[in-house]
Image (tube, rainbow, N blue to C red):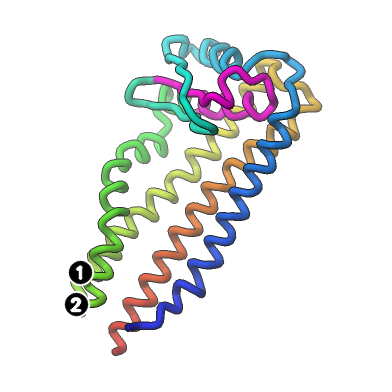
Amino acid sequence: MLFDQGYFLFVIPAMIFAMWAQAKVRSAYNTYSRLLSQSGRTAVEVAASLLRNAGLGDVRIERQRGHLTDHYDPRSRTLRLSDSTYNSASVAAIAIAAHEVGHAVQHSVGYAPLAIRNGLVPVAQFTSQAAFPLFFIGLFTNSGFLMDLGLLFFLGAVLFQAITLPVEFNASRRAMDMLQVSGYVAPAEVVPVGNMLNAAALTYVAGMAVAVAQLLRLLVLRGARDRD
């Protein structure tokens, strides 16, 4: 058995960072979900208005069961707002809804990183699930080919995480711009909305960090096997 030093050097610190990022999101949401927007409009009302302003009145809005399960589905052109967001008039809910509208706008204008990410979804799902079994079967059977194939598959998953970052940050920028132009965010609410959007974006940075850490871990194990 090889000592998995890469796990302790890379993965554990990245997981701690990811847990901190999740805590930041929970803290921001708990804070700003109690802060009612000065506009008095609910998240679903704001989302519908922003979509109309962007010429996307045909995009459907549906209520999604769960907490913070909000997302935009480009296949059905449907924006789904979670139970905790849909009828809330909080700053947090409006920021989340506007972010998802940002994805809808990206889709409508053919934003390249989003198109690439959407095209990679089925590939990334397969490669991320197959990477570790292939690598560790190769590790314990001393098959360099399987280890390298697992590394290649996991590299695909890392690239998917990398292309996700600009997509999410761009959606947040669009959300802030739309909210300010439409007047749904008062000057005093710009910082709270920005804090909510930035905290949510931090989770994607953490996801990227964990993916890179896992890749480095596999590379360490691969190098150690070659030296044995």
225 up-or-down from 100: above or below: below
Question: What residue is disc 1 on?
Answer: 146
Q: Earlier in the sequence, mark 2 or mark 1?
A: 2
* Image quadrant in which the N terminus is located: bottom left
Q: CA distance from mark 2 to mark 1?
A: 9 Å
Residue that sits furthest to the right in the current view = 188
User: Looking at the image, which is closer to me, 112 or 194?
Assistant: 194
Name the spot of residue 71 as percent of width and height, x first: 46, 30
Q: Is residue 161 left or right of residue 130?
A: right
Tell me where the magenta segment starts and ends, as one range.
Answer: 78-102
Tell me if mark 2 has few (under 14), some (14-19) or many (20+) residues whose alpha carbon lies within 10 angstroms of its own: few
User: Looking at the image, which is closer to me, 84 or 165?
Assistant: 84
Q: Main secondary structure of the magenta part?
A: helix
Name the spot of residue 101 as percent of width and height, x first: 52, 23
Question: What residue is disc 2 on?
Answer: 141
42 up-or-down from 102: above or below: above
**Residue shown at the point (63%, 49%) measured from the top left:** 23
Amino acid residing under circle 1: Leu
Q: Quadrant of residue 151?
A: bottom left
**Residue shown at the point (64%, 42%) measured from the top left:** 26
